[in-house]
Amino acid sequence: MNDAVRNGGDGFGRIAYINPPTRGRTLESKLAYGGVQVDEDWWLGSGIYTGGSADLPAAANPTIRADYPAMVGVWRADDGTVYFLNDTIDKMPAGENRWVVTAQDDRVISGFKIFSLPDGTVENQTFVGIFNPDGETISFIDRPGEWATGSLADQNTLFIAWTNPGDDTATMAGSLILHRDITA
């Protein structure tokens, strides 16, 4: 959809996206349409949830070399910890986390992550990850100043360590263990 709009056209695509809280905040399949480019970075579109669990879109460009593991799919955290660093160190559970890798081109992966904030709101952020030459470590970026490093323990387990500069009151850091969801 993005390429079609940037080239002056429009496009349809199937995406996986979190449904609003009124529907239980579940990851569902959505038919989306992109049609109007606002500026270089933004475009308008719409979509409709097609129900059921999300059918992940196929990788946009599935050229994956054998030395980089295939990552497309849903990854869920079964535990994790967030640390707020200020005058003290405050520790709290990370809450629900899902990372959805929607595309992989060789050593570059992209997708979105869905996670709960301490106040109960849910965030949905896009990310890009790049495999280091070892084929087991991934460097992630999502928003300015935020980074994460992932290490594959095996083909279905990813350990994530991250930091966020936060605001003038605290810096945040955390860790997650993500497992590939083979039922999604």
Image (cartoon, rainbow, N blue to C red):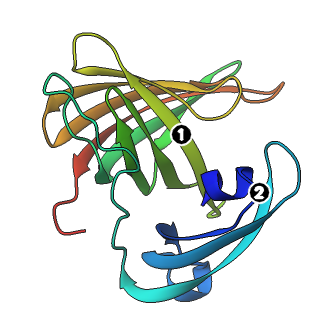
Q: Is disc 1 placed on a helix, strand or loop?
A: strand
Q: Identify the disc placed on residue 127.
A: 1
Tell me residue 32's x, y (percent): 59, 74
Residue in the image at 67% along x and 34% along y: 143
Tell me residue 173's x, y (percent): 54, 26
Task: Give the camera-side residue of 164 and 158.
Answer: 158
Q: On the picture, is 41 further left or further right than 95?
A: right
Q: On the picture, is 123 further left or further right than 54?
A: right
Say above or below: 165 vs 179: above
Tell me residue 73's x, y (percent): 29, 54
The image quadrant where one finds the C terminus is bottom left
Residue in the image at 21% along x and 26% along y: 68
Say above or below: 44 vs 151: below
Snapshot quadrant of residue 58: bottom left
Q: On the picture, is 39 further left or further right than 55?
A: right
The image quadrant where one finds the N terminus is bottom right
Q: Earlier in the sequence, mark 2 or mark 1?
A: 2
Residue underneath mark 2:
8
In the rendered image, is residue 118 in sight? no
Tell me residue 36's x, y (percent): 81, 65
Residue that lies at the very extreme toward the right in this rendered image? 38
Residue in the image at 15% along x and 43% along y: 156
Q: Residue type at mark 2: give it.
A: Gly
Q: Is disc 2 placed on a helix, strand or loop?
A: loop
Residue in the image at 71% along x and 51% along y: 7
Please rate how many residues cluster around mark 2, counting C-alpha atoms within 10 Å: few if below 14, some from 14 to 19, many from 20: few
